[in-house]
């Protein structure tokens, strides 16, 4: 208790991941804040609406969502998109437009499918970086979750994966 509260809080936040921090928004469009609680030695993470914090939990339809559930849903959505043929075609077209003339649609498909299989082996910090690269916004409604993807993020990801593949092959 001798340590200032803001330092103790910073140390705790560094150990409690918030994959969607800054990306997740409540039903009214305002950002949700990552939070957590400890019970019997376990950490329970969640995202809470600003209204619930400021005005009380009885003032809004969605007050909080379990972090693991919403993060899992967003990651599943991103992985499904990476394998979607129409997204592969759009990513390939955007890459060609940005000067990657020699890249083929097949190469984009292979890179994205291979990446989806490697995802679970990535460190949490790398996963968070890629989520920030790919996800523009997550909107939570009472009965739905909307995920907006960054098209330019997909092109950047393909470029990174392509460079990694070239480095490995060399």
Image (cartoon, rainbow, N blue to C red):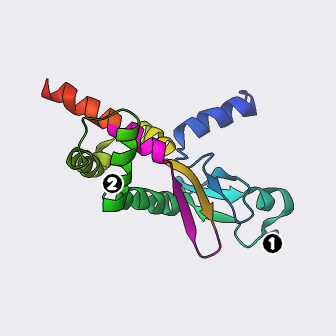
Residue segment shown in magenta: 141-158
Identity of the residue drawn at 74% across and 55% down: 30
Q: Secondary structure at mark 1?
A: helix
Q: Residue 76, percent across and down?
A: 40, 61
Identity of the residue drawn at 67% across and 37% down: 9
Quadrant where the C terminus is found in the figure: top left
The mark that comes first in sequence, 2 or 1, is 1
Q: CA distance from mark 2 to mark 1?
A: 46 Å
84 or 73: nearer the viewer: 84
145 or 125: nearer the viewer: 145
Identity of the residue drawn at 82% across and 70% down: 59
Q: Quadrant of residue 95?
A: top left
Q: Secondary structure at mark 2?
A: helix
Say whether residue 123 is magenta.
no
Label 1, on which residue? 58
Identity of the residue furthest to the right in this view? 55
Residue 156 located left or right of residue 11: left
Image: 79 above or below 121: below
Q: Is residue 8 visible?
A: yes
Image: 128 above or below 44: above
Q: Residue 107, percent across and down?
A: 22, 44
5 or 127: nearer the viewer: 127
Q: Callout 1: 10 Å neighbours few (<14), some, many (20+)? A: few
Q: Residue 11, percent across and down?
A: 60, 33
Label 2, on which residue? 89
Q: Callout 2: 10 Å neighbours few (<14), some, many (20+)? A: some
């Amino acid at each position: 208790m001798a340590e200032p509260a803001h330092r103790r809080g910073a140390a705790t936040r560094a150990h409690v991941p918030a994959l969607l921090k800054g990306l997740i928004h409540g039903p009214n469009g305002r950002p949700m804040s990552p939070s957590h609680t400890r019970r019997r030695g376990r950490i329970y993470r969640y995202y809470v609406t600003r209204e619930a914090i400021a005005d009380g939990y009885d003032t809004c339809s969605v007050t909080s969502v379990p972090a693991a559930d919403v993060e899992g849903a967003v990651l599943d959505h991103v992985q499904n998109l990476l394998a979607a043929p129409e997204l592969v075609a759009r990513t390939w077209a955007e890459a060609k437009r940005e000067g990657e003339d020699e890249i083929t649609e097949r190469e984009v498909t292979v890179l994205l499918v291979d990446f989806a299989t490697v995802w679970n082996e990535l460190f949490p910090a790398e996963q968070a970086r890629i989520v920030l690269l790919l996800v523009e916004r997550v909107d939570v409604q009472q009965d739905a979750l909307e995920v907006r993807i960054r098209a330019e993020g997909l092109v950047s990801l393909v470029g990174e994966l392509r460079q990694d593949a070239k480095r490995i092959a060399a």
